[in-house]
Amino acid sequence: MNSSSVSELYIGLMSGTSLDGVDAVLADFSGPRCVVLEYHASAFDDTTRAELLALNSPGANELHRAALAANGLARHYAQAVQTLLREAGVPAQAVRAIGAHGQTVRHRPGEFDGTGYTLQLNNPALLAELTGIAVVADLRSRDVAAGGQGAPLVPAFHQHMFGQPGQDLLVLNIGGIANLSALGADGRVLGFDCGPGNALMDHWCQLHTGQPFDRDGTWAASGQVLPGLLALFQEEPYLHRLPPKSTGRDLFRPEWLQERLARFGPATAADVQATLTELTASACAESAISYQNNSKFLIVCGGGAFNRHLMARLQALLPALQVQAADAFGLPALQVEAAAFAWLARQAMRGLPGNLPMATGAQGARVLGCIYPA
């Protein structure tokens, strides 16, 4: 740490649209770039995952169930924080703040009344009570209030972590949804959601194999891409919209898939998995080509970086780029998003903007998040 009396240690927590669990990092910002001192991953149990997934869709007694799920999530976060600190040998009082994004269950910016909303389940007050550390939460709603999408918020951190003066660079995060950051040689940064990441692939895999995800993409690799079905998938208007744009499970949900499968007709489960993987790869590749400029690398983070078949398809579709996991650029792929929310907490605690209007479409830079003191 630096010699200042203000700690530069922050914790970042990320539970994304893949709904697999919580990634937690202890990050040190005392140097020119973020350094992760400790990482801990904590999986959701089947009951928690099922309830969080169910709350993505309208259902009975939603307010009560959502409030209890938020309490459970805060307790899960607190356990992850305590394990992280124990493994790092760092006391809670040494940490300035926790960036706790919460679990997105609805994301409808700009819709209905012109403002729309984005909703993350969380109980940051409970998290502050359980950990004794200040919590920064509700990180998206100010950007939405300012006319933005509230997402993606990671491009500014991608610039902090990976940006190189005078070099164009692309960073692709593949979680449940895939998002691209285009870091310009001139310092300009653009970011947007490309389309589906792992969400539809994971759903189909769980449905037909009982496994939560297609390990290494082996099942998809055993099937054949169905051109007609891929074309049906690619008709989705979202894929053809220009940024700023963001999406989530509100759009790319099981019903979206079933509607298109019904129109297409019979297909083997493995062929559908292969085609869903190709949909993700093609949506990401087309986005990368559109904003490639003089980039030589596509840095991939998130769980999708571990899908070997998906990574191979990205490389095949992007022959002019070197497609590599973020590990080769100083931060392991599974730690990038959690580290980004640690960085966003730091921005909030310092009273500095966390959004990039060029990425989200907001009317201007805004300080993001609400602070719950220790």
Image (cartoon, grey):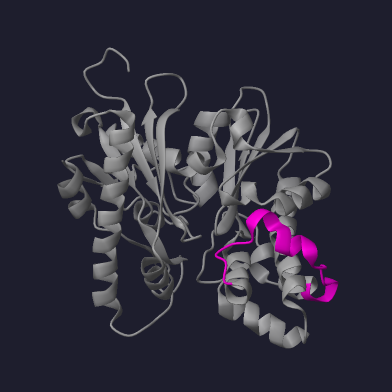
Q: Is residue 165 left or right of residue 27?
A: right
Q: Nearer the viewer, residue 119 or 29?
A: 29
For the point 33% across and 42% down, which residue is it?
Answer: 367
Q: Is residue 225 visible?
A: yes
- Quadrant of the image for the C terminus? top left
Count the marks: 0
The image shows residue 361 at horizontal and vertical percentages of: 50, 52
**212 is within the stretch colored magenta:** yes
Say which quarter of the image contains residue 62.
Answer: bottom left
Q: In this view, does 322 lie above or below 52?
A: above
The image shows residue 10 at horizontal and vertical percentages of: 32, 33
Q: Nearer the viewer, residue 365 or 159?
A: 159
Say which quarter of the image contains residue 182.
Answer: top right
Q: In this view, does 358 lie above or below 58?
A: above
For the point 24% across and 57% down, which residue is it?
Answer: 123
Q: In this view, does 305 lie above or below 278?
A: above
Say which quarter of the image contains residue 118.
Answer: bottom left
The image shows residue 101 at horizontal and vertical percentages of: 36, 51
Q: Nearer the viewer, residue 127 or 306?
A: 306
For the point 76% across and 78% down, which residue is it?
Answer: 268
Magenta-colored span:
210-229
Q: Is residue 353 visible?
A: no
**223 is within the stretch colored magenta:** yes
Q: Which of 48 and 120 is in front in this view?
A: 48
The image shows residue 149 at horizontal and vertical percentages of: 47, 57
Q: Is residue 148 left or right of residue 100?
A: right
- Quadrant of the image for the N terminus? top left
For the point 42% across and 54% down, which residue is it?
Answer: 15
